[in-house]
């Protein structure tokens, strides 16, 4: 009986990025799964505050002083006093893969009561192809005990490289403030044992609290937009990144998966505070979504950076009239790419990997 290959740890190829304003005692629960990895802690808020990290973890900690000294004027594109600051950790990492998790997310248990190694599942998701061009009704065909169903074209069974693995949450669901207010006691107890590829041409609300991605394939697009201090909106950082990422993944023939793994989200943030942060986004998104649904990136955009800069231009042109914020956000997007390329000179080369995929895509 062939043994089922265990998932490679990728311990030297993956960084764990944690945005935080509090001590990281939550890591104790993750120690078994996280200890082999390097952590990039992005300390938000007051840089003079000391963040306690449990013994035995290999980590680097960046606070606002570090952000400003590394990026100089370009630090303006990194949010302050919002979890969006986490994207700074994506920028300074030198690894191929990123896993990002919030500090109020704990190890969940599967229906048989076993602890879920969320990182292992994300790695499986990222190392197996995606199927955005044709939906497999038995979900993830590359999973042990599953396959492509009858009628699935063989020409599409190779799939495409997976750029993003979007995990979910038991207990406190990632609801918006109005839903939180209406359903304050609702908890997610439903464990759905599935991983699905998001079909090409479909957007989704990407949550940043349990998220992994291939930094070499899509890193430059993982900009968590301008939120928090000095900004008219909050809690749309991960959403914005998800919409940009999905449009670019569709263009470059890359895949986005959602579903397993689950984490246990323990803390409901204050719905009234959240409502204040979200309220402009709640009506702006009725214009933002049609914008992303209508975006067509030029075929000359064969790297993530080129796609992202073209997208920033379109944001300024099409959404600038909705609110001046979007002009500022478009500038933030451009500054982000400048900062990314300044600190990741080799990324154009990896962008050419996407370029290669784009050629495959464009060849069709
Ligand atoms: O100013 C801040 C506030 C928080 N953080 C860190 O960010 C994450 C998420 O914070 P928290 O769990 O308190 O908030 P949630 O509402 O549950 O977060 C969800 O909404 C999204 C907001 O954009 C977020 O991505 C979702 O997970 C924690 O690690 C805090 O320590 C911060 O860095 N700065
Ligand atoms: Mn939370």
Image (cartoon, rainbow, N blue to C red):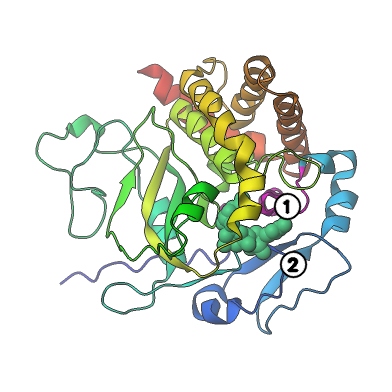
Q: CA distance from mark 2 to mark 1?
A: 10 Å
Q: Secondary structure at mark 1?
A: helix
Q: Nearer the viewer, residue 345 or 134?
A: 134
Q: Residue 275 location, x and y as percent? A: 61, 48
Q: Is residue 92 magenta?
A: yes
Tag 1 or tag 2, which sits nearer the N-term?
2
Q: Position of residue 111 (x, y in %)?
A: 27, 73
Where 99 falls versus 205 (above or below)?
below
Can you give x and y, in whole percent of width and height, for residue 169 in the image?
A: 43, 61
Residue holding disc 2: 60
How crowded pointer 1 is (Cα within 10 Å; few <14, some 14-19, many 20+) is rated as some
Image disc number at residue 92: 1
In this rendering, the answer to whether 137 lies above or below 363 is below
Residue 211, percent across and down? 51, 54
The range drawn in magenta is 78-97
**Residue at point 67%, 19% (across, down):** 313
Rendered image quadrant of residue 321: top right
Quarter of the picture containing the N terminus is bottom left
Give the left or right position of residue 209, taking residue 263 as reference. Answer: right
The residue lying furthest to the left in this view is 150
Q: Which of the image's four quarters has the C terminus?
A: top left
Q: Residue at x 65, y 34 (%)?
A: 348
**Are the residues at dot 2 and dot 1 in contact (C-beta closer than 8 Å)?**
yes
């Amino acid at each position: 009986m062939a043994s089922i290959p265990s998932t490679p740890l990728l311990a030297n190829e993956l960084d764990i990025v944690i945005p935080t304003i509090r001590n990281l005692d939550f890591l104790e629960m993750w120690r078994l799964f996280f200890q082999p990895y390097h952590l990039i802690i992005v300390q938000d808020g007051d840089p003079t505050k000391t963040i306690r990290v449990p013994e035995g973890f290999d980590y680097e900690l960046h606070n606002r002083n570090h952000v400003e000294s590394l990026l100089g004027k370009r630090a303006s594109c990194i949010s302050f006093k919002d979890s969006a600051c986490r994207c700074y950790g994506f920028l300074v990492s030198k690894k191929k893969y990123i896993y990002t998790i919030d500090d109020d997310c704990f190890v969940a248990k599967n229906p048989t009561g076993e602890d879920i190694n969320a990182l292992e599942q994300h790695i499986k998701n990222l190392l197996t192809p995606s199927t955005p061009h044709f939906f497999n009704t038995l979900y993830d065909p590359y999973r042990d005990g599953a396959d492509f169903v009858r009628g699935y074209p063989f020409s599409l069974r190779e799939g495409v490289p997976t750029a993003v693995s979007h995990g979910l949450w038991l207990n406190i669901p990632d609801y918006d403030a109005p839903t939180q207010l209406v359903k304050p006691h609702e908890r997610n107890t439903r464990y759905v044992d599935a991983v699905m590829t998001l079909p090409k041409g479909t957007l989704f609300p990407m949550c940043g609290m349990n998220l992994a991605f291939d930094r070499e394939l899509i890193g430059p697009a993982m900009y968590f937009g301008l939120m928090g201090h000095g900004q008219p909106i909050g809690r749309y950082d991960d959403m914005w990144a998800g919409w940009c990422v999905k449009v670019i993944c569709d263009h470059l023939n890359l895949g986005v998966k959602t579903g397993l793994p689950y984490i246990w989200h323990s803390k409901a943030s204050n719905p009234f505070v959240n409502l204040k942060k979200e309220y402009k986004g709640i009506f702006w998104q009725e214009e933002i979504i049609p914008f992303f649904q209508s975006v067509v990136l030029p075929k000359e955009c064969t790297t993530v950076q080129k796609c992202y800069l073209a997208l920033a231009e379109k944001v300024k042109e099409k959404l600038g009239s909705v609110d001046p914020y979007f002009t500022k956000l478009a500038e933030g997007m451009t500054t982000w790419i400048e900062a990314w390329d300044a600190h990741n000179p080799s990324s154009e080369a990896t962008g050419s990997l996407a370029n290669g995929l784009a050629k495959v895509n464009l060849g069709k």
